[in-house]
Amino acid sequence: MAPKLLSLVFLVVFLLSLSFETKGSNTGFVLVKPPAATTTHFDALFDSEYYLRRYGYFDYAQLNLEIGASEEQILELATKTYQENFGIKPTGKLDDETLSQMKTARCGNRDIIDGVNSMKPRSRSM
């Protein structure tokens, strides 16, 4: 009985910690919800801003813009850099192709570490 109760308590604590996690700003980059017909649990929780921060794109963009750049400008450059790295037309907008690429399985290592982009930007395939 005790292991089941302990598991239940752990699950509740974990779920509560997720609900208190801070999200980004009102930049439109925070929560992406695809059409209901194709929504999965992963899609509903996908946070593109967190993804760009997690893999180093946000910090890289911040280093390469003037001091005082808005978060929206930083996110746009972060998105462009991500798109260039993955051979997507660099618009700086979270289009379907970009979001689809972000949702594919990948390693957990950062692409950009200490301002150094470890990826070679891919050329777009036609």
Image (tube, rainbow, N blue to C red):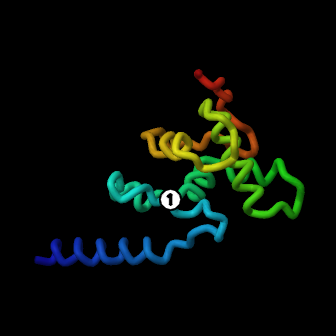
Question: Is 65 situated left or right of 113 in this image?
Answer: right
Asked which secondary structure carries label 1, the reply is: loop
Q: Quadrant of the N terminus?
A: bottom left
Residue 65, percent across and down? 84, 52
Residue 48 sits in quarter: bottom right
Report which residue position mark 1 lands on: 32
> Is the residue marked by circle 1 packed among few (<14), some (14-19), or many (20+) residues within 10 Å?
some
Residue 118, percent across and down? 67, 33
Residue ranking furthest to the top: 126
Task: Name the one closer to the observer, 108 or 46.
Answer: 46
Residue 67, percent across and down? 88, 60
Question: Is 4 situated left or right of 77 in this image?
Answer: left
Q: Residue at x 44, y 40 (%)?
A: 104
Task: Name the one closer to the observer, 97 or 2.
Answer: 97
Residue ranking furthest to the left: 1
Three-letter amino acid code of the residue under disc 1: Val
Q: Residue at x 69, y 47 (%)?
A: 92
- Residue 107 vertical placement versus 4 (above, below): above
Task: Name the one closer to the observer, 48 or 119.
Answer: 48
- Residue 122 vertical placement versus 107 (above, below): above
Residue 37, percent across and down? 32, 54
